[in-house]
Amino acid sequence: MLLIPCPYCGPRPELEFAYGGEGGIARPADPAALDDDAWGAFLYHRSNPRGMHVERWRHVHGCGRFFNARRDTVTDLFACSWKVGEAAP
């Protein structure tokens, strides 16, 4: 069982969480000004690196909050997690 470190609740089993996508992606300042191609790129084009990667997670069956985490995509191990709005450790 993979344990995911929720910064609010502590380590919990992976079954309590939902993946929220790549972390650190800024929403466009004026979404209405984007054409379809630019909006599609924002929504769907993500990197898929091998190794350490920043992701967003939600503790669905716990506190219900979103948080950021750094995970190694090769080993599936979490290096750290932090609250949304805080700087990465």
Image (cartoon, helix red, strand yellow):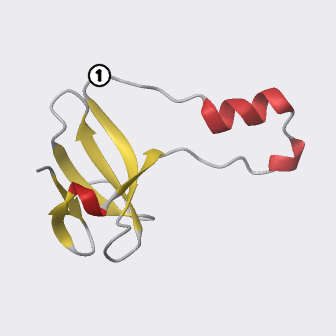
> Which secondary structure lies at badge 1?
loop
Residue 68 place in picture, x, y as percent:
36, 55
From what the image shows, is residue 14 above or below residue 55? below
Q: Quadrant of residue 75?
A: top left
49 relative to 8, above or below: above
Q: Quadrant of the image for the C terminus?
A: bottom left
Q: Nearer the viewer, residue 86 or 70?
A: 70
Identified at 26% across, 58% down, the residue is 15
Question: For residue 34, what is the image quadrant?
Answer: top right
**Percent of width and height locating residue 19:** 40, 50
Instruction: Using the rendered image of the protein, determine whether residue 38 is visible from the camera's viewpoint.
Output: yes
Residue 86 location, x and y as percent?
A: 39, 64
Residue 74 figure quarter = top left
Residue at left offset 88%, top offset 43%: 33
Q: Residues within 10 Å of mark 1 (few under 14, many from 20)?
A: few
Q: Residue at x 17, y 46 (%)?
A: 79
Identity, as a three-letter code, of the amino acid under mark 1? Arg
* Image location of residue 40, percent across then percent down: 73, 32
Left or right: 81, with 34 as reference point: left
Give the residue at the far left of this rendering.
Answer: 1
Count of picture labels? 1
Q: Does residue 23 appear anywhere in the picture? A: no
Q: Is residue 58 left or right of residue 71?
A: right
**What residue is drawn where x is 17% and y is 65%?**
12
Left or right of 35? Residue 3 is left
User: Which residue in the protein does label 1 denote?
Assistant: 50
